[in-house]
Image (spheres, grey):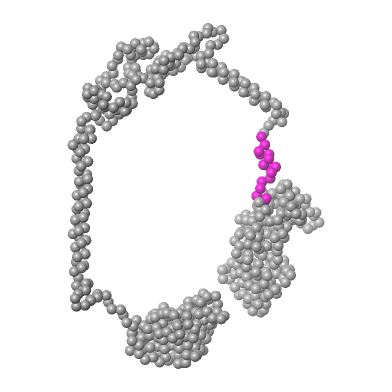
Amino acid sequence: MTSTTTGLPDRYRPLDQVGPDEPTPTGVIRCWRAKDRVLNRDVAIRVHTPAGPAAHAWITRALTAGGLATPALAMVYDASEGTGDPTTPGGAAYVVNEWIDGETLTERLARGPLPERDVRTVLRRLAEGVAEAHRVGLAVGGLTTDNVVLRPNGLVGLRAVPAATGTVDGDVAALGSLLEACLTGLPSGDGEQPRPLTGSSDLLALVRRARSTEPGQAITSVAAMVALLKERPRSAMSVSTQPQRAPEESEGGWRRRIRDRRTAAAASGGQLAATVAGTPEAGSAPEAAPERRDPQTLPPVPPVRPVGATGQPLPPAALGGDTIDASTVAPRAGAYAAPTAVPPSGPPRHSADADEDASASGRDTGDDDRYSRYDFRDDDDRYDEEPFGVLSDDEVDEYRSGPYTDAGPITEESDVTTPRRRLLVVGLPVLALVVVIALAWWIGTTVLSVTGSVDDNVGSTPTGGGVTSSAPAEEQPVAAGDPVQIAEAAVFDPFGDGEPENDSDVPQSFDGDPATSWTTLTYRGSPAFGNLKPGVGVLYDLGSEQSLAGVTVTSATSGATVEIRTGDSADGQLDSYATAGSGTIEGTTEFAFDEATTARYVLVWVTGLVEGGDGFSADLAEVEVLSAG
């Protein structure tokens, strides 16, 4: 239905009344869906009847709610206590809320209870918003199924924020009632009996604790409800964490199986160890006792060639051409390391002793045997084994004519003391010294010559006849002449709201009597005109263009700041008047121009006010425009 409310600002146009009337201890609150004509959006506007002091407590709660920013609570856009006069715009007490589109919880529960997952989500998000309001000291109130709206995007919102009255305990109990309604649904009203309360055990316990008043059983805060609604059911957790076991299996059965498996594993491990160590099986002849070998003697190495299914070694052709016997490779380090030998520069040579050792151990003495007799460490390691002092001259010559390394053969040219190395070591410092000397010479001839030319300038140094200064003389202000007669004056207020600024008192600012003055309006909150406008002034008409040297301003209250501007038109904007001087008025203050200015209009523009008894203001007691002498 269409509203006929009055007393609201013209900005809001009520459309339809929504929701029932909300009685309060001081009156009645009615809610309408309205159109905000300025921002072109729908809002929910609630009106308290009567207005004035009766609605003060409700408006105070609304101002506190205006600082909240949570999607679970409707935002507060505007609030006013009103004057109580319903015939004038702004006479009603009202609160403007965000309009929330969606389905109310009453409409949804009429079709049946919510699924348990939706119950947890809706109640948790709503409780998070209420907990945020409690954090700033505001009890929300009005937590009913008619005010809770399920948004289309899956969120939940509460209309009518805040209610006229509310308490923290009342919000906890109301959330418990909403939880019960979501679990049971709402009766249709056709004689249907209330549905039984069913659901998870933790939700049922939460309903009872929210309604309980016994100490130690009741929930004391909405934040605790949020934490409980986030928990998973304990029964599901216990089922998921219990180990799965067959019902017919007893504790003694699975322990017995573990013990049998350990026994079998130990037996198989012993048999494997015996096989690896070569332990004789039953019925076999005992072997000879182990003998202790010399530390320098290589131990026997078993062949690495695999054994076929018949127990016979595979032929060499089955292993591939790149397979060698592990026994033919000598260890590189340790007690069994072979002595280091330096291979000759020619092809590898076979010694009779090596052939005898190879034949005795059953190894092949072919070309692969040469890799076991040579040490392939870097050639530089040979210098670390023994100092040159213990080598004979022949041995040194043999090393110098030896095989090539990665850096090339070791010759006399690679020595550090060669002439080429000596040239680099000595030449680089000499080259750096030459560069430094050349740089110093350039600085001395260039920079110092410029300095000397500056010192030789005429007039820059004192002479015997006096002191000559090249600085320009300081500009002197224009000499002031007689005062110029002011033809008329008017208030200049381009940034005002149309209200008169004591326009009738303007002639008193140039009547020749300092006891009379023109005064601005009184502004509150800030000396910058209450942050409403940048300034206000008086525009003086001299009748014709005059050559001006300055302006003298007298004020009864010192401390106001002004700008003296000049121009040629009475209808110009503030920027069309050039600034000729500025400063603070201290009793009678003369604002002298830096140069003579030709203008017909002089604007005394007040930019800062002075604090008084009930606000901020400024006055112009006497203004004199001085001509250029």
Please report the residue visible at 56 percent of the width from the left and 20 percent of the height from the top: 269
Q: Which residues are magenta?
A: 228-243
**Quadrant housing residue 155:** bottom right
Name the one closer to the observer, 545 or 431.
431
Q: Is residue 463 above or below residue 189?
A: below
Total numbered labels = 0
Which residue is at 22% across, 44% downward? 428
Query: Is residue 191 found inside the magenta-colored segment of the image?
Result: no
What predominant SS class does the magenta segment belong to?
helix
Residue 595, position in %: x, y?
Answer: 33, 82
Where, quadrant-wise, is the C terminus in this rendering? bottom left
Q: Position of residue 57 (x, y in %)?
A: 68, 70
Image height of 195 relative to 517, above or below? above
Q: In the picture, which quadrant includes the N terminus? A: bottom right
Does residue 276 appear in the picture of this structure? yes
Q: Is residue 469 left or right of residue 534?
A: left
Residue 503 locus on image (x, y percent)? 51, 87
Q: Is residue 1 visible in this depiction of the protein?
A: no
What residue is shown at x 62% (from left), y 21% (from top)?
A: 263
* Left or right for 445, reference 341: left
Q: Residue at x 72, y 59 (%)?
A: 169
Quarter occupied by residue 522:
bottom right
Return the x and y of residue 600 as percentages of the image width and height.
Answer: 38, 87
- Residues 201 and 618: in front is 618
Q: Is residue 239 magenta?
A: yes
